[in-house]
Image (cartoon, rainbow, N blue to C red):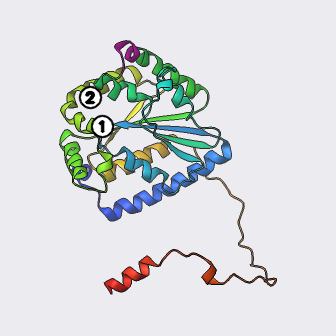
Amino acid sequence: MTTAKARKLPREFYERTLYELQGELVTMQEWVKATGARIVVVFEGRDAAGKGSTIKRVTEYLNPRMARIAALPTPTERQRTQWYFQRYVEQLPAAGEIVLFDRSWYNRAGVERVMGFCSAEEYRLFLRQAPIFERMLIEDGIYLRKYWFSVSNHEQEKRFASRLNDPMRQWKLSPMDLESITRWEDYSRAKDEMMVHTDTTESPWFDVEADDKRRARINMIHHLLSTIPYAPVTRPPLVLPERPDGHGYERPPRDVTRYVPDYAGDLLLREG
């Protein structure tokens, strides 16, 4: 690893580059809308590797009606009796949509495998069916991209400790997350076995080194853009119309409306 790669990205460089890439994401979104393309992006990886923060940067300027996040909760009792992939199928995009999976069907190969939430037969069945399922998506015209976010054990523990002491981010921690520290090697073995079966020519995995979150976001977004054959779409010009003259409308008196108190103004006065 070169010094340039090892050095943490300067904030100014990061923010400028990220904004440029986000502009390209908007261009890609317009192409998706115009062509009816469908894109699925799978985010997997270690706990605290920065998947969620990267997804936020991807979607920051996108239309939420066209680009949505699928972060499914624990399956219900009914869903547990369905075909495993069934509830994920319901989240797949229609024409002109982008879906980002914050965790995906690969839960079965990760946390369910390590924590014993699925049987050995269910796990083996998943490894056989996942490549077939993904081949079906691709053959139907969906652009499928899979990203694995890697983080060192020391960096993961550092981020857990930071969350533990931050009341604004404590919600990100669960007993399951903390147990991943003691099961680091178990998760490593599960990931390696998963890759053997699901890193295929048709649907490859792409590893994102994420000890530096800024670098990870830039690298992942740039790679995604480089793999989608989008092109700028010419939009019809929009002209702001002139506001017409009034026709006798009078606004009701202010005292008949319930306004939110000016907390910001009061706070400013107190601090001034």
Quarter containing the C terminus? bottom left
Task: From this view, report whether residue 249 is shown above or below residue 168.
Answer: below
Name which quarter of the figure residue 191 lies in: top left
Judge left or right: residue 213 versus residue 130. Answer: left
Residue 177 seen in render:
yes
Residue 195 seen in render:
no
Spot occupied by residue 105 in the image (x, y as percentages of width and height): 44, 29
CB of mark 1 within 8 Å of CB of mark 2?
yes
Name which quarter of the figure residue 249 lies in: bottom right
Spot occupied by residue 112 in the image (x, y as percentages of width and height): 35, 25
Q: Give the magenta range.
A: 118-124
Q: What whole-number distance in Å separates the C-alpha atoms at marks 1 and 2?
A: 8 Å
Task: From this view, report whether residue 83 is shown above or below residue 244.
Answer: above
Q: Residue at x 19, y 43 (%)?
A: 157
Judge left or right: residue 76 versus residue 251. Answer: left
Q: In the structure shown, which secondary structural element does the residue marked by tag 2 occupy? A: helix
Front residue of this view, candidates 145 and 156: 156
Q: Residue at x 58, y 45 (%)?
A: 230
Q: Which of the two discs, 1 and 2, labels the residue nearer the N terminus?
A: 1
Spot occupied by residue 5 in the image (x, y as percentages of width and height): 26, 49
Name which quarter of the figure residue 117 lies in: top left
Residue 122: in magenta span: yes
Q: Which residue is mark 2?
A: 187
Judge left or right: residue 211 versus residue 198. Answer: left
For badge 1, the amino acid type reads Arg
Q: Which residue is mark 1?
A: 46
